[in-house]
Amino acid sequence: MKGPSPALLGLDTLINIRRDQLGFYADMRARFGDTVPLRLGPYRSWLLFHPDQIEVVLASKAKKFIRFERMMKVLRQWNGESLFIAEGQSWHDRRRKVLPAFAQKKMPAYEAVFQQVAQDWVKHLSEKADTEGNLHLNADDIFAQIALDIALRTLFGGGFSEGMDQVSEHIKVLSKVAFRECASPFTLPDYLPLPGKREKKAAMAFMRDLVRGLVEDRLKGPAGDDLLQVLIETHVGDKQEICDDAMSLLIAGHETSGAALSWIFALLADHPAALAKCQNEVARTNEVQEMDYLRAVVDEALRLYPPGYTLFLRQATEDVDIAGTAVKKGDLLQIIPYMTGRDPRFFVEPNQFRPERFLTEPTWPFFANIPFSAGPRACTGHQFALKEVSIIAAELLRAFQPRLSGAFPAPEPKFSLRPQNGLPMIWEHR
Ligand code: HEM
């Protein structure tokens, strides 16, 4: 199996990834095929591009892999030992406890919150339109705030809007720090008086106090009808466990949904025929489950621009055969939904926005399109997120005609995949 020749223990690879991460992956696949060995400091690492290999790592031999401990150490700083971070039996127990929060029977209550948030934002944004009814905005920022609003209301109940700007700013800092620290070979300790460290510590303290305060209030007060209540019941009052999982759902649950909405709107604004079809659909029905075309748009946007463009690095806990490749204990495995979702062997015109491909039975292998990952560690919020982005998109499309202010944005790999330089748009009141 051939890969790039390692210079300086893979420092050149790290530099290339930093320079143009998505371009680097495309170049590796074009030059070396489905299986690319790389050196990353002391580790041997593999890029795996074929769905058969992905199936082995995420599903059939999932027990032989953990998430790379170095990355988890970064996230554990504020996510604690949450569902997102835990491994082995501890992860298994937590997943079992958190899953009831996403059961089908809970969805109607969340959907009511999505509708309410959508209406509140339509009203709020309508008030900001200029005299001609146009709104000039960075839609990426707006979607981040809407997704945060939803995360806060579904987790902690209503009445939170006053402090939201502050929460949003602190989460932005944490997301930036997490991306930087996960991508660095080592992290300098927080006690050093370095730029960014004070900001990070303040953001961490703010978020911890916020979540702890909300959890303590709820433990003292009456029960609610939200995600937090399910966490309290399943963790049987263990405050630390409740706080850790609440924090991880808050963070996991909104970055990605906000990014998904940005790409849906960017793509629709760039494809007037698809936009018109969605608008006809939302005019015809209020029921989001009847909006087949909008659902196909959401799926296609997630295929082209999966917010989780690369999964967390996995590490083999024993020697293992991955569809013919002998991987050693300690090796790292990288799976990149952004690449597999655009593989020309499985998708016709893979780089084109063609929602119609999702209106019929899939013609691609299941593991080729995994915006929510797959297997036992797949996203617990999958159905929640699909409903959330569909309801928000439907309400906004009913109220506004979105237009891009400039060129279609390039994707920028941050903690999730976001439009580079935001998403300047003009939304015209309809
Ligand atoms: C469009 C929106 C979303 C996308 C694209 C997305 C994507 C993903 C992906 C790719 C993973 C797996 C990461 C990996 O294994 O490397 C994941 C895990 C997870 N997601 Fe989501 N997610 C979304 C929304 C949500 C929401 C709304 C919630 C909760 C409210 C959520 C909660 C979680 C949790 C708890 C995990 C960890 C599961 C585990 O490790 O067992 N996600 N998500």
Image: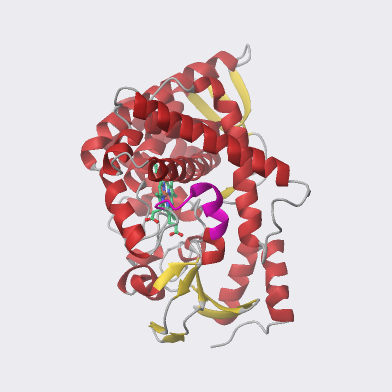
Position of residue 148 measured from the top left corner of the image (x, y, whole percent) = 49, 34
Going by the image, does 129 lie left or right of 357? right
Position of residue 406 measured from the top left corner of the image (x, y, whole percent) = 67, 38
Instruction: Pick whichever, 55 or 293, lies toward us.
Output: 55
Q: For the point 44% across and 31% down, which residue is it?
A: 152
Q: For the point 32% across and 45% down, which residue is it?
A: 383
**Residue 416 is one of the magenta-drawn residues:** no
> Which secondary structure dominates the residues rendered in magenta?
helix
Looking at the picture, does residue 362 appear above or below residue 258? Answer: below
Instruction: Pick whichever, 295 or 48, lies toward us.
Output: 48
Looking at the picture, does residue 239 appear above or below residue 121? Answer: below
Position of residue 394 measured from the top left corner of the image (x, y, whole percent) = 40, 31
Going by the image, does 424 lie left or right of 330? right
- What scheme was used to colour the molecule? secondary structure
Q: Quadrant of residue 181?
A: bottom right
Question: Residue 426: in sight, yes or no?
Answer: no
Going by the image, does 305 lie left or right of 245? right
Q: Quadrant of residue 391?
A: top left
Count of residue discs: 0
**Residue 74 is one of the magenta-drawn residues:** yes
- As drawn, which residue projects farthest toward the top? 131
Question: Residue 66: in sight, yes or no?
Answer: yes
Position of residue 343 measured from the top left corner of the image (x, y, whole percent) = 47, 67
Q: For the point 49% across and 78% down, which residue is it?
A: 34
Looking at the picture, does residue 158 appear above or below residue 352? Answer: above
Going by the image, does 16 lie left or right of 217? right
Range covered by the magenta-colored residues: 73-83
